[in-house]
Structures are given as C-alpha cells and as structure tokens.
Amino acid sequence: MSRMPFLSGGRLYEVEVTNPEDKSKIARFWGYAVNHFRATGDPSRLEPYEGQTYEGLLYDTDPDVIEDFLFDTDFDFQELYEP
C-alpha cells in the first residue's frame, strides 16, 4: 500500500493506493499531465483525466485551479519519484 498526493477541488489529499494500476495512473497525472502543464501552459495532457475519479475524488483538470494550487503551495511532485 502506498500513500500518494491527489489533487481534487483545489485541495491536496493524501490517498491510500493499493492497486498498482491506480498508483501508476496517479503518478502519470502528476508527472505526465501536471508537469507538462506547469512547464508549457498546455493543458492537453490533463484532458484524459477529465471526469475521472479515484475513491470518489475527482481529478482536478481545470488549468486555473491547478495553476492556483501550484502558485499557492510549495508542493514538489518530484518527491513522488524519490526512494
């Protein structure tokens, strides 16, 4: 079981993830979608997550919400990949 950060409703949650596929999907959201958006301003990689949920929490895909979150916090999603 892993605990992972999950962005929903403009808030950061820590969710328990037991399924490797779910863990991979959440990590891709941060690494592939959010990081790309942060680096380029291009929200296209967020689109596959629109309407998707994990344990009842909706993936945040609104570029304005994500931008506000990144601006207002010191969250470093790169920590997801540190051993």
Image (cartoon, rainbow, N blue to C red):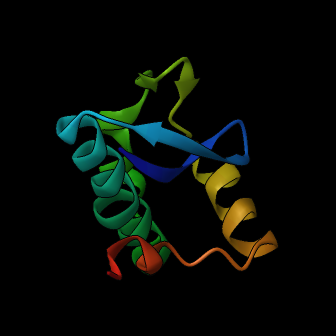
What residue is shown at x 73% (from left), y 45% (from top)?
Answer: 10
Left or right of 81, for residue 50: right
**4 w.r.t. 58: above or below:** below
Tell me if 70 is positioned left or right of 79 in this view.
right
Any part of residue 51 in sight: yes
- Name the residue: 62% across, 56% down: 66
Q: Residue at x 35, y 39 (%)?
A: 47
Identify the residue at the far front of this view: 1
The residue closer to the viewer here, 19 or 32, is 19
Looking at the picture, how far across and down is residue 45, in whole percent? 30, 52
Q: Position of residue 49 (x, y in %)?
A: 36, 35
* Residue beneath the point at 23% across and 48% down: 24
Q: Is 6 positioned to the left or the right of 50 in the image? A: right
> Residue 77, how many percent across, how many down?
48, 72
Say how many tags the image has.
0
Front position in the image: 81 or 63 = 81
Please say whether residue 61 is visible from this viewpoint: no
Q: Quadrant of the C terminus?
A: bottom left
The image quadrant where one finds the N terminus is top left
Q: Quadrant of residue 40?
A: bottom left
The residue lying furthest to the top in this view is 56
Image coordinates of residue 46 in percent, x first then y, are: 38, 47
In this view, 61 is above or below 32? above
Name the residue nearer the viewer: 63 or 30. Answer: 30
* Residue found at the far right of this picture: 72
Q: Describe residue 39's horizontal placement relative to residue 6 as left or right.
A: left
